[in-house]
Image (tube, rainbow, N blue to C red):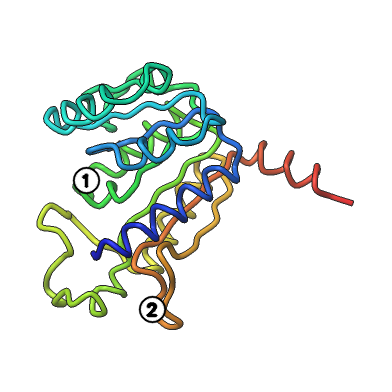
């Protein structure tokens, strides 16, 4: 995906996170920390955490953070770990984000991810983004290939929507689906996003907006 699309996707995601009013954010599969570094620009987000299975990615991110002011470094916790593992450190966050990471999991592990994220960690909001396979042709990706060699699957909009709605129903969340990074009138966006909100919170917010 081009740098322009990466930036458009990141800008839209950050805007959505800020609109939620989340004060603590867990980045699941943080990689080199692109999202964390962007969110550090906003003092309203008081606590950030990043986990990744890649020890080298965590090391690079620690090195990047070391150049920042102490007050910013103090807002970030990093750890090597798997999003599939039970870990009490990841409980209690307002928002958990999986930015283009779910497609790196084996499909057989999705039920385990579902339990960890929606049952064990159970944040107020969850954002999951993943490539929209319908857009691949516009990016020059051949039909028999994925965008990245480490991708285990890539879903079209209907498949992602079915998975997201099923997970939401099973765990007491409402879900909103939308394109990410712009949208083609027929094919949707290059990426797609599911925003989950715990139903108790969603009802409370809806009532507060009622006339």
Neighbor class of circle 2 (other Cα within 10 Å; few <14, some 14-19, many 20+) is some
- Mark-to-mark CA distance, 1 and 2: 24 Å
> Against 202, is 42 above or below?
above
Q: Position of residue 146 (x, y in %)?
A: 16, 65
Q: Which residue is nearer to you in this view: 146 or 172? A: 146
How crowded pointer 1 is (Cα within 10 Å; few <14, some 14-19, many 20+) is rated as some
- Give the position of the N terminus as an image quadrant: bottom left
Foreground mark, 1 or 2?
Answer: 2
Secondary structure at badge 1 equals: loop
Query: Horizontally, is 85 left or right of 93 in the view?
Result: left
Q: Which residue is mark 1?
A: 105
What residue lies at 35% left-to-right and 57% top-to-bottom? 7
Kindly identify which numbered label has been placed on residue 209. Answer: none
Q: Is residue 21 above or below residue 189?
A: above
For the image, the number of numbered tags is 2
The percent position of residue 193, horizontal first and vertical second, equals: 43, 56
Where is 111 relative to 193, above or below?
above
Pointer 1 and pointer 2: residues touching (CB < 8 Å)?
Answer: no
Q: Disc 2 marks which residue?
A: 187
Position of residue 36 relative to residue 77, above or below, is below
- Residue at 80 percent across and 44 percent down: it is 207
- Of residues 115 and 52, the one nearer the viewer is 52
Query: Who comes first in sequence, dot 1 or dot 2?
Result: 1
Rendered location of residue 203, percent (x, y) = 72, 43
Q: Is residue 87 left or right of residue 127?
A: left
Q: Residue at x 33, y 35 (%)?
A: 28
Q: Residue at x 39, y 68 (%)?
A: 157
Left or right of 96 in this view: 141? left
* Residue 154, image x, y percentages: 25, 62
Classify mark 2: helix, strand or loop: loop
Give 54 or 144, whichever is nearer the viewer.
Answer: 54
Residue farthest to the right?
A: 211
């Amino acid at each position: 995906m081009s740098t322009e699309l990466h930036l458009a996707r990141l800008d839209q995601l950050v805007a959505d996170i800020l609109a939620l009013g989340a004060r603590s954010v867990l980045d699941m599969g943080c990689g080199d920390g692109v999202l964390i570094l962007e969110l550090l620009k906003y003092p309203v987000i008081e606590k950030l955490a990043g986990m990744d299975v890649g020890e080298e990615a965590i090391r690079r991110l620690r090195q990047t953070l070391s150049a920042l002011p102490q007050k910013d470094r103090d807002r970030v916790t990093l750890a090597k770990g798997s999003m599939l593992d039970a870990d009490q450190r990841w409980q209690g966050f307002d928002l958990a984000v999986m930015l283009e990471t779910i497609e790196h999991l084996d499909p057989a592990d999705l039920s385990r991810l579902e339990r960890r994220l929606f049952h064990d960690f159970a944040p107020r909001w969850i954002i999951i983004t993943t490539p929209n396979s319908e857009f691949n042709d516009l990016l020059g990706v051949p039909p028999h290939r994925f965008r990245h060699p480490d991708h285990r699957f890539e879903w079209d909009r209907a498949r992602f929507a079915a998975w997201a709605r099923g997970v939401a129903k099973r765990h007491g969340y409402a879900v909103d689906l939308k394109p990410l990074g712009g949208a083609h009138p027929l094919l949707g966006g290059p990426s797609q996003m599911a925003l989950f909100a715990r139903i108790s919170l969603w009802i409370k917010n809806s009532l507060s907006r009622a006339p």
